Image (tube, rainbow, N blue to C red):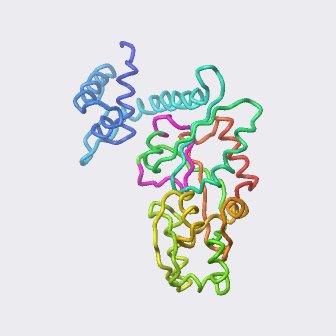
Amino acid sequence: MPHLNLKHMRYFWAVATHGSIARAAEILHLTPQTISGQLRELEEQVGDKLFAKSGRGLALTETGRLVFSYADDIFRLGEELEDVLAGRTPTGGLSLNVGIAMVVPKLLTHRVLAPVLAMPEPIRLVCAERPLVELLADLSVHKLDLVLADSPLSPALNIRAYSHPLGESATSFFAATAKAEALMADFPASLHGAPMLMPSSASALRRALELWLEHQQVQPRVVAEIEDRALMKTFGEAGAGIFTAPQSVEADVLAKYQVRVIGRAPELKERLFAITAERRIKHPAVSLITEAARRGDFS
């Protein structure tokens, strides 16, 4: 029997993992015809069928399951090696490539990443802020080591990644100094009819905030929906409306912006997650971040 072709094995593994030739072709940026031809050659080498029709998809045969068990070990180990090597720069130094979902508060992001820059070994920190779906796509092809998000990875997304909770915080409500005192007196009833800056619908906080307002039987006047939380604070400081931030960074908000706290909602939680391509974290900087979370540093 000739040596098995690893390229053929990778195409087989992609089809078995993603459930169809069409999806594997999309992931690998190849035509379905190319993958079908490579699978036929692999079946000729193996001497047996690897897939059988199952409805609109494909199911592994008994031989296919055997081959897949070995292929899965081979390529998952290869991906783990890539994850480890991705943490090294071409000069041998350490780097950390972080994707930050636009809905994550910037002050909280700084708190999470600041310990990385204090590591004994010099590190090059590269941050990218984009919509979460784009960041997860980069994570899946190892362009990023870590994604910071306000919610865990959705099972609906066909991406192999793992969510690690970093912490949660109650929510504080802020208003420009000149308008704050009137809103503080009867919080949260004072929110009814008041101008408010809301996080975008992409934010997990948006859904939780709407439910909380409904429970309080108040309906503020939404004047703007803003995805960038730093921009929201700038608008709030200018008097455009009330805004929220995690209570854990309340002191930082007060120090940086001319605003005051008008009330707090202990039951309204804002959460932060680290999403990685590997279940067992090996990158030392990511390990540092998750260890700090276990100590409660970000709550």
Which x, y percent locates residue 215? 54, 82
Counting from the top left corner in percent of width and height, residue 148 is at 57, 49
Tell me the quarter of the picture where residue 252 sits: bottom right
Q: Specify whether 36 is left or right of 71.
A: left
**Is residue 74 on the magenta stretch?**
no
Residue occupying image coordinates x 65% and y 87%? 186
Q: Where is residue 213 in the image (x, y as percent from the top left)?
A: 53, 79
Count of marks overlaid on the render? 0
Q: Residue at x 40, y 35 (%)?
A: 65
**Front-most of residues 82 and 125:** 125
Question: Which residue occupies the foreground of this view, 12 or 47?
Answer: 12
Q: Which x, y percent locates residue 202?
A: 45, 60
| x 36%, y 33%: residue | 64
Quarter of the image with the N terminus in it: top left
Q: Quadrant of residue 71?
A: top left
Residue 243 vertical position relative to residue 16 in the rendered view, above or below:
below
Q: In this view, does 253 lie to the left or right of 44?
A: right
Q: Please determine whether, in this image, residue 263 is positioned above or below residue 39.
A: below
Q: Nearer the viewer, residue 244 or 29?
A: 244
* Quadrant (top left/top right/bottom left/bottom right) for the C terminus: bottom right
Looking at the rendering, the stretch of residues picked out in magenta corresponds to 139-157
Task: Place residue 205 in its image quadrant.
Answer: bottom right
Q: In this view, does 15 lie to the left or right of 144?
A: left
Relative placement, left or right, of 144 versus 294 is: left
Considering the whole magenta stretch, tell me its main secondary structure.
loop
Q: Residue furthest top?
A: 2
